[in-house]
Image (cartoon, helix red, strand yellow):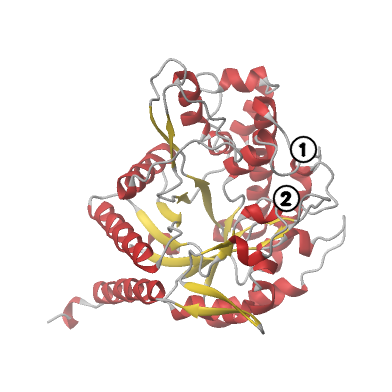
Amino acid sequence: MREPWYRDGRLHFGVGVENTFVPQSSSSERPIDEYVLTEHDLRWRDDLDLACAVGSDFMRWGIPWHIVNPQKGRWDWSWCDRVMERFGEIGLRPIVDLLHYGTPTWLENEFLHPDFPEFVSEYASRAAERYATVATDYTPVNEPMIHALFCGEYGYWPPYGRGESGLVALSLAVARGFVRTQHAIVEQLGTAATFVHVDASMRYRGDVDAPEHRDTARRLTHQAFLVEDLVTGAVGDGHALVDLLRSHGASDEDFAWFFENQVKPDVMGVNYYPRHSTELFETGIHHSGGFADPRPTRDDGVAGLAEMLRQYASRYGAPVMVAETCVTDDIPTRLEWLDSSVQAVRDLRDDGLDIVGYTWWPLFDMYEWTYRHSQLPREAHLLTMGLYDLVETEQGLARRRNPIADRFAEFARQEDREAAEMARPVSDVG
């Protein structure tokens, strides 16, 4: 049997297409469907070709659950079928996000519906079976702790939970669906399945030892890993958050179920944004840390990236990859981050850390989540992040290649050359 891609010794370069889906709406909230906002739903064929044009080995790409499962018991895979067929035609490896924040609109109470784990695992099973010849790499839940925070603690996205009780309820529900999803995929694909678990880096610095911040900073530091700790069966007596979980309804039976059904990452994906991943505590100043009242952040650059990669590798005993990174800024600033972050990853590999991938996110620009609570046109929420700029034209959103794409392609080609050189028989060298 061929070795999986993440064991071939290479640093794989890839991109992602932003696939946040929060399709629920109200009189004051617009649905978010990044595929519609960026017109990827229309331009998907060209977009996949753009990924190949910059030398990508893989693309992190999400199935829109709310589209393929528009009503309970009804399935429509027609759009995804065409995209998946194109992945196969051009030889671009999809790493499939199955859940990137949103559930179908028919699923009442979203993640807290009592049958959510059953519904999401059925969806995963159907997808894995349908696309078995094209897709074997899956991310069951992208950034599960962001799900728990935005949907469970901050009351920002459905089902609008708040506080510690909401956080615990969402964490347990998302984690149970996560586990059921991974098992469902294994039932379809067996040992061919590869699982890239992905979560957001969350670092806390500043006055973390100040009396008014010490307990909160300690909780948040452990909380950043909560869902991954649950799904890998690591939560029980002795876990730093076990008392918090128990005080909000988690039981020993819950912990036993996660232990008995634990799932592991083949690759641990780390999302790191230098300007957002490190939050600061300040003496005498209180911030809720919620989306509406964020703590200040500090850019710790590649030092923060290296720390988080090492920490995830050590905590979960798996190869790691940079699953998302970029800065939202002008071209020179983005180029500087691309150069420095790729060099940091290469230095860590030279030091023996098993890093298997680097993902620039996203392939093309995206629109900020604030679009949901705004009445302004989409262009007011544009985030300049991509290898390709999104440009408004009379024909819709054009993709304009920028110098970051050229530099990214240079890095990818360099890796290809080095891999080819390493693969040459000894008799061919010299």
Q: Is residue 328 above or below residue 262?
A: below
* Disc on the earlier residue, 1 or 2: 1
In the image, what residue occupies the spot 52% across and 70% down? 364
Which amino acid lies under the numbered mark 1 shown in the image of this protein?
Answer: Leu
Q: Which of marks 1 and 2 is in front?
A: 1
Relative to 61, 159 lies left or right: right
Provide residue 402's location: percent of width, then percent of height: 43, 76
Could you classify mark 2 by the number of other residues whose Cα lies within 10 Å: few (under 14), some (14-19), or many (20 or more)? Answer: many
In the image, what residue occupies the spot 38% across and 25% down? 207
Q: Observer-nearest residue: 314 or 336? A: 336
SS category of the residue bearing label 2: helix
Q: Observer-nearest residue: 102 or 367? A: 367
Relative to 160, 286 lies left or right: left
Residue wearing tag 1: 112
Provide residue 141's location: percent of width, then percent of height: 61, 49
The answer to whether one can see residue 136 in this image is no
State which quadrant residue 136 falls in: bottom right
Distance from disc 1 to disc 2, alpha carbons, whole Å, reads: 15 Å
Q: In this view, does 226 lie above or below 349?
A: above
Q: Observer-nearest residue: 110 or 2? A: 110
SS category of the residue bearing label 1: helix
Which amino acid lies under the numbered mark 2 shown in the image of this protein?
Answer: Ser
Q: Residue 368 carries which label?
A: none
Q: Observer-nearest residue: 248 or 134? A: 248
Residue wearing tag 2: 121
In the image, what residue occupies the spot 41% across and 42% down? 312
Q: In which quarter of the image is the C terminus?
A: bottom left
Q: Is residue 276 above or below residue 16?
A: above
Contact? badges 1 and 2 (CB < 8 Å): no
Provide residue 195's location: percent of width, then percent of height: 54, 53
